[in-house]
Image (cartoon, rainbow, N blue to C red):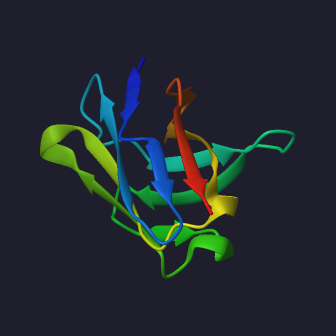
Amino acid sequence: QVQLVESGGGLVQAGGSLRLSCAASKSIFSINAMGWYRQAPGKQRELVADISRFGRTNYADSVKGRFTISRDNAKNTVYLQMNSLKPEDTAVYYCNARDIYDYWGQGTQVTVSS
């Protein structure tokens, strides 16, 4: 089992940046994929970005060129660097570890004001 704890959310103006962190309770080296999802009020949870154990990344079209996912296996941490933020990026952001089972963090709120 893996516990995931997100941090780094907050309130930012449009055009600003935030970096989210997801700290895992155990080594993420062998976990198949780590990802970030988000859920806005009244909407379904959607994939933002993920990164495989081999470092291959995948992004939602809406964030390509603005967000960057990375992982530091030595620190058991995954990051999401978010630049050029837009009001439509406002959501609760969740960290996910995808292995034999899916594990989720508790979420961190990101609010982008116009």
Residue 72 x, y percent position in the rendering:
20, 51
Q: Is residue 57 above or below residue 109?
A: below
Picture quadrant of residue 54: bottom left
Q: Residue at x 49, y 27 (%)?
A: 105
The reply to whether residue 80 is in sight is no
Residue 84 x, y percent position in the rendering:
47, 74
Residue 36 x, y percent position in the rendering:
52, 49
Asked whether 22 or 27 is in front, the reply is 22
Q: Is residue 35 above or below residue 114?
A: above
The reply to whether residue 8 is in sight is yes
Q: Residue at x 38, y 56 (%)?
A: 18
Say whether residue 89 is left or right of residue 26. Answer: right
Quadrant of the snapshot with the C terminus = bottom right
Picture quadrant of residue 53: bottom left
Q: Residue furthest right?
A: 42
Say whether residue 81 is left or right of residue 111. Answer: left
Say whether residue 21 is left or right of residue 66. Answer: left
**Number of callouts in the render?**
0
Say whether residue 66 is left or right of residue 76. Answer: right
Q: Residue at x 53, y 60 (%)?
A: 49
Q: Residue at x 64, y 51 (%)?
A: 90
Asked whether 99 or 112 is in front, the reply is 112
